Amino acid sequence: MGQESSTPVDDTTRPQTLNARSLEAIASYIKKGRPKKILLMVFTQNIDCLERAAGVPGDKIIEAHGSFARQRCIDCRTEYPDDLMRQAIHSREVPHCTDSECAGLVKPDIVFFGEALPEEFHQNRGLPGLADLVIIMGTSLTVQPFASLPANCPGGIPRLLINSESVGGLGSRADDVLLLGDCDDGVRKLASALGWLKELEALFRAHNQDSSSAGQVSENKKLRSNTLDDEIAIITKEVENSLRISDQHAASLRQNQTLPERTTSQAPISVVLENGSNDQSWPTLHTGDLDTIMTVTHGRAASKD
């Protein structure tokens, strides 16, 4: 299934299900007869168990690209015990299958390039069609078949995008709501509209003792940004030094008449990054995606929680 139309819905088009295309309308829709703990499933491309660390039960997560939560033999597919894997990592030994007749290599259950996605993804990719609300956040929605998940819910089902930019045709349906900006800020705005902000902050403190407040989270972001700026400065200096050395070497070779003079028509070095920028200067580094899709439901396929 391909991407949806990227044409934004006309402002004059009335929503089919929501009373308005706004965050407040989404909050009202959730609170209207929809209790908490109605998560149907989280689909994620993360492999670092981020959702598990946040407290989402394993049976509510579809890790489309696998994760480090489990590991197994690459030959016979026998699961490998967690304690033995930790022991192998700490001792820097290569883990082998516990079946002596196999003795194959062991790797985490992550999907490498060219490998098939886990069967559980294909078995559950239709779940967005059962949801009453689909929340998409922190993703570029460029990798198929994961990118097609939001399109699997029928028209009239509200979709909320919490993201730094509009992606994947979100905003083309009458009941699409786009909350563009920082994902953490967007989640807090949604929680605030629902009247759940204090509970959310308490969960943050419970799961992340080092970032016990919104102020601390903001400070941590600033520190990470400063660190990234420092790293860019170091890389830039190393490139400049390399170019200086290359120019000195070229000048030496020209003295021996082995190289032509460099002309002003030669293009400067161009840096191409993941976000597709192609500038003749150092652009801002693309820091990656959360790539998470959450579906919530009420009635038709409500969870047991």
Image (cartoon, grey):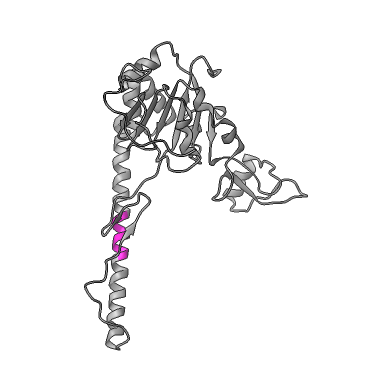
Q: Residue furthest top?
A: 33
Tell me if I can see residue 213 in this picture.
Answer: no
Where residue 298 appears, as percent x and y from the top left, is: 48, 16
Residue 283 among those drawn in magenta: no
Q: Residue furthest bottom?
A: 256
Q: Which portion, as a residue range, is magenta?
A: 232-239
Which of 285 and 179 lies nearest the eye of the viewer? 179
Which residue is at a point 36% across and 53% down the rendered structure image? 273
Relative vertical location of residue 138 with respect to residue 36 in this rendering, above or below: below
Q: Residue furthest right?
A: 101
Where residue 34 appears, as percent x and y from the top left, is: 44, 14
Where residue 118 appears, as percent x and y from the top left, is: 59, 39
Q: Is 79 on the left-hand or right-hand side of 177?
A: right
Which residue is at a point 30% across and 65% down the rendered structure image? 269
Q: Is 119 on the left-hand or right-hand side of 137?
A: right
Relative vertical location of residue 100 with respect to residue 219 in this rendering, above or below: below
